[in-house]
Image: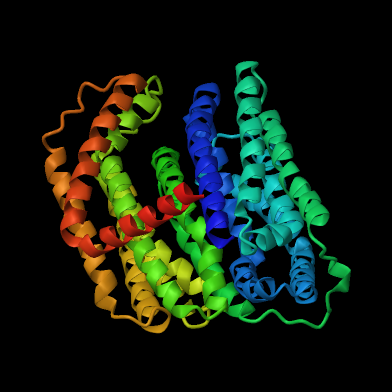
């Protein structure tokens, strides 16, 4: 059952992320052409500021998932209901704080640099409308979403997200084509996303025998404030770049960062499909104290994962600027071509993804208190370095801060997980990451001999992408065969056993 759920979760999340990426590339292009780069940047900036409201969720999500693994494994419905009931009570209490935050944002945001040149009523309307979907997601759908993910049913969540996202994309394209006002477009978009928590709640209530009324009221969620600390630091860190660029530079830099970051966010989301599909399984192993199995499973997963992200980011390094050139063709109000910025933002995203499996495993094991200080150090490094460099280097300055902070946090997680969860030498992970760096260096050297100057449209870019993907995959696989002989043999043996069993049925 565990393996089947991993496969279902991974496939459904991967499918959702692919559609999300395709639609995510289409929507900004449609909005920029329909309303201009500055209006698109305004909506992006507002969305980023609204992301700070997730501080109200206080990191409870990752904590709740980690404590649900055990009662789910034991099929203790009463304990599950108790955890979910108190989780929902917590979300209900902060509704008032959320409303005050939106009101405060409506008063303050119109006076920022990003909102200069826009009508105040337009800006306030967009803030209220864009906040609707987040409001319903966090305060009416998050509780059951967390339960489904902890119960290894992430594929249900992904399928619901997939349907609503396709509907949202079709609605936006049609409305922009018909000349609807940006306010109406964003309103309809938000209302579509309100369907997510509604469908989710109906599914859980019909499929599970869980009644929140049967839960106890006096339950205190453990590690709640450690989760709060981690979450606040994480939100500050992930949104600091856009915030600093909005305050200290012009709207053009916000637009450039938003377009590149949109692409990298989509790639990271695609990669996260592999971690989200396995999170609950690793959490289940840890809850059942299957430590040896966890260690072996994570070792194989870690090897495969690092090779996949090296291929993907190797391709991204080569292909992102040609793609941006084609993607922004016909948009002349901002120059989106910036090679140095492209290199640094891809590198920072690569380092971020390297740390993801170690980060996820620490959270699956409920190690929030033990890793909370590193979250704040990461945020402080990012903000301080970015503040020092943003005035002189602008986009490049904030990315240097991001790169330095993510490297620090990655090293911290690798050391902690190796010593305290997997109980193995740090050198095992260090060797694998060193091999990744070696592969990336070789990819960069080889890329100098790949001429992509001919790329002028999507068709030519796809052809270039196929050549780059095949070339980089061969390089990465060849190096893997040298360094990962034992892992490859083990994977092949398991696959043979699996196919042999099927053939004997």
Residue 456 in percent (x, y) is at 29, 20
- State the colouring used for the structure image: rainbow
The residue positioned 64% from the left and 76% from the top of the image is 70
Q: Which of 222 and 409 is in front in this view?
A: 222
Q: Nearer the viewer, residue 253 or 78?
A: 78
Residue 69 appears in view = yes
170 is higher (above) or lower (below) than 490? above
The residue positioned 84% from the left and 68% from the top of the image is 212
Is 123 left or right of 48, judged from the image as shown? right
The residue positioned 45% from the left and 40% from the top of the image is 251
Residue 173 in percent (x, y) is at 60, 23
282 is higher (above) or lower (below) than 219? above
Residue at the outermost right position: 213
Quarter containing the N terminus = bottom right
Is 413 left or right of 222, judged from the image as shown? left
The residue positioned 37% from the left and 83% from the top of the image is 423
Is 369 left or right of 476, judged from the image as shown? right
Residue at the outermost top position: 178
424 is higher (above) or lower (below) than 72? below
């Amino acid at each position: 059952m565990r393996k089947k759920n991993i496969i279902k979760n991974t496939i459904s999340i991967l499918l959702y992320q692919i559609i999300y990426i395709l639609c995510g590339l289409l929507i900004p292009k449609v909005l920029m052409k329909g309303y201009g780069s500055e209006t698109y940047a305004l909506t992006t900036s507002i969305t980023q500021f609204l992301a700070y409201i997730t501080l109200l969720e206080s990191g409870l999500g990752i904590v709740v998932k980690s404590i649900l693994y055990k009662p789910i494994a034991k099929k203790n419905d009463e304990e599950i209901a108790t955890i979910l009931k108190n989780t929902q009570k917590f979300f209900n209490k902060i509704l008032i704080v959320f409303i005050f935050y939106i009101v405060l944002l409506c008063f303050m945001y119109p006076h920022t640099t990003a909102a200069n040149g826009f009508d105040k009523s337009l800006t306030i309307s967009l803030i209220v409308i864009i906040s609707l979907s987040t409001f319903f997601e966090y305060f009416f759908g998050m509780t059951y979403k967390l339960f489904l993910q902890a119960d290894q049913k992430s594929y249900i969540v992904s399928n619901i997200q997939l349907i609503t996202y396709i509907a949202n994309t079709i609605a936006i394209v049609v409305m922009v084509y018909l000349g609807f006002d940006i306010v109406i477009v964003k309103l309809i978009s938000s209302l579509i996303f309100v369907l997510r928590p509604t469908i989710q709640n109906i599914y859980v209530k019909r499929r599970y025998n869980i009644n929140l009324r049967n839960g106890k009221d006096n339950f205190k969620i453990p590690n709640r404030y450690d989760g709060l600390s981690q979450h606040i630091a994480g939100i500050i860190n992930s949104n600091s770049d856009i915030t600093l660029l909005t305050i200290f530079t012009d709207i053009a830099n916000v637009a450039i960062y938003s377009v590149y970051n949109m692409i990298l966010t989509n790639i990271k989301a695609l990669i996260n499909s592999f971690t989200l599909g396995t999170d609950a399984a690793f959490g289940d192993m840890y809850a059942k104290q299957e430590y040896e199995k966890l260690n072996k499973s994570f070792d194989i997963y870690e090897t495969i994962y690092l090779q996949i992200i090296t291929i993907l980011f190797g391709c991204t390094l080569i292909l992102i600027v040609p793609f941006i050139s084609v993607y922004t063709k016909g948009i002349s109000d901002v120059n989106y071509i910036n090679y140095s910025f492209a290199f640094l933002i891809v590198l920072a995203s690569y380092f971020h993804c390297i740390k993801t499996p170690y980060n996820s495993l620490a959270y699956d094991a409920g190690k929030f208190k033990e890793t909370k200080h590193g979250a704040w150090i990461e945020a402080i490094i990012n903000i301080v370095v970015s503040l020092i460099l943003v005035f002189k280097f602008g986009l490049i300055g904030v990315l240097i801060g991001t790169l330095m902070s993510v490297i620090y946090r990655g090293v911290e997680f690798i050391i902690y997980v190796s010593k305290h969860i997997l109980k193995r030498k740090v050198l095992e992970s260090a060797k694998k990451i060193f091999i990744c760096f070696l592969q990336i260096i070789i990819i960069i050297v080889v890329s100098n001999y790949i001429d992509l100057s001919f790329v002028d449209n999507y068709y030519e870019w796809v052809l270039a992408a196929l050549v780059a993907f095949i070339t980089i995959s061969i390089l990465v696989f060849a190096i893997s065969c040298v360094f990962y002989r034992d892992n490859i043999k083990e994977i092949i043996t398991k696959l043979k056993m699996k196919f042999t069993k099927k053939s004997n049925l």
